[in-house]
Amino acid sequence: SAVISQKPSRDICQRGTSLTIQCQVDSQVTMMFWYRQQPGQSLTLIATANQGSEATYESGFVIDKFPISRPNLTFSTLTVSNMSPEDSSIYLCSASGALNTEAFFGQGTRLTVV
Amino acid sequence: SQQGEEDPQALSIQEGENATMNCSYKTSINNLQWYRQNSGRGLVHLILIRSNEREKHSGRLRVTLDTSKKSSSLLITASRAADTASYFCASQGGKLIFGQGTELSVKP
């Protein structure tokens, strides 16, 4: 199993600013992902964080809005850029040790944009 | 839309009763997983069933998978108040795609 530490756990931000969320895994993992969960909704995959290369984004998500870094096998960041109130959500980091295995999740970052 | 579908969206039962949640997905899969989420926090993995399996048990959990119908069900037997949470299925064919979720309330 893997333990995922995500920070900040919550933040209230002004519109037009950016927030970077950090995700640290306690062991080397193959796959890391970022999800968004809007209030009362399910999880939507934003992107797969690839080590040492550009992230793979899902339809509807772009690098300019959600730049992602993954410099090594245990750490990734997600930035929410030029925020608007519509970006208010929970953002979750996920990791798995291998393809097609169970995923582990951080506790999430609850973001409110005012 | 990424999401698969789950039903019911909400389920309220008494302690000791069984709870059944159903999930449908859209694409071919390698496995299907079920997760639990308490109060909008991180998800906890419950069980994984591979595409070549039809049924799997773990404690009070029983999961079935019907790949011909692209559907799965989660049964929680002898429910407890502590089982109150949101339950999500997630289909995996590479990426993990989540269903809409079922909000389960177990009343003492």
Image (cartoon, coloured by chain):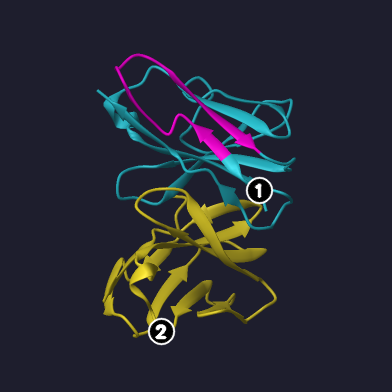
Tags 2 and 1 both on a single chain: no
Q: Any magenta on residue A6?
A: yes
Q: Residues within 10 Å of mark 2 (few under 14, many from 20)?
A: some
Q: Secondary structure at mark 2?
A: loop
Residue highlighted by disc 2: B78
Range shown magenta? A5-25
Query: Which chain is yellow in the picture?
Result: B
Amino acid at circle 2: Ala
Kindly identify the amino acid type of the residue bearing the numbered disc 1.
Answer: Ala
* Residue B47: % across, % down: 58, 68
Of residues A90 and B58, which is closer to you in this image? Answer: B58
Q: Can you name the residue that lies furthest to the top here? A: A16
Classify residue B31 as left or right of residue A14. Answer: right
Left or right? Give the position of A91 relative to A63. left
Is A23 in the magenta? yes
Q: Which residue corresponds to the image point at 69% horizontal and 33% vertical from the top-left?
A: A50
Which residue is at 24% across, 23% downward? A114
Q: Which chain is cyan?
A: A
Q: Position of residue A62 (x, y in %)?
A: 50, 27
Report which residue position mark 1 lands on: A2
